Amino acid sequence: MQHLVSTLQGYVINEVLHRGWLEFVRLFSQADSIRKVHDKHINVLDRALNRCLLGVKLKPVKGLIDNAFGCILKTKSMVIL
């Protein structure tokens, strides 16, 4: 269980936060108006949602991870009285 949580945490830090920030900084430097900054920010947030498995296309993958965590919690409740 701890390995799964650590792996997901690493994924979120590297793929969502760090990558998203670098992407936003790169796009920010290309913007020449506040409206373009806003639009680019929205695009970065949309990509971050997909990387967090919250996009429509990734719903089955998120369901598998939710099921795995459900099994982990069920096992934990059986082991710890």
Image: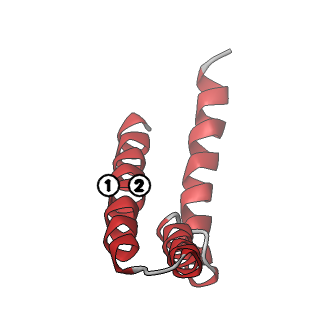
Q: Which amino acid type is shown beneath numbered disc 1?
A: Asn
The numbered dot on residue 56 is none
Closer-to-camera residue (30/65):
30
Q: Is residue 34 above or below residue 79?
A: below
The numbered dot on residue 14 is 1
Image x and y of residue 7, in percent: 35, 48
Image x and y of residue 64, in percent: 56, 65
- Residue in view at x 61 percent, y 57 percent: 67
80 vs 10, left or right, is right
- Residue in view at x 49 percent, y 72 percent: 44
Q: Which amino acid type is shown beneath numbered disc 2?
A: Leu
> Are there few (<14), some (14-19), or many (20+) residues within 10 Å of tag 2?
some
Residue 65: image quadrant is bottom right
Image x and y of residue 70, in percent: 64, 48
For the residues bearing labels 2 and 1, Cβ distance under 8 angstroms:
yes
Closer-to-camera residue (43/5):
43
The residue mark sitting in front, 2 or 1, is 2
Residue ID for mark 2: 17
73 vs 36, left or right, is right
Query: By what rule are the colours in the image chosen?
Result: secondary structure
Q: How far, Cα to Cα, is label 2 from label 1?
A: 6 Å
Q: Is residue 21 above or below residue 1?
A: below
- Residue in view at x 35 percent, y 80 percent: 30
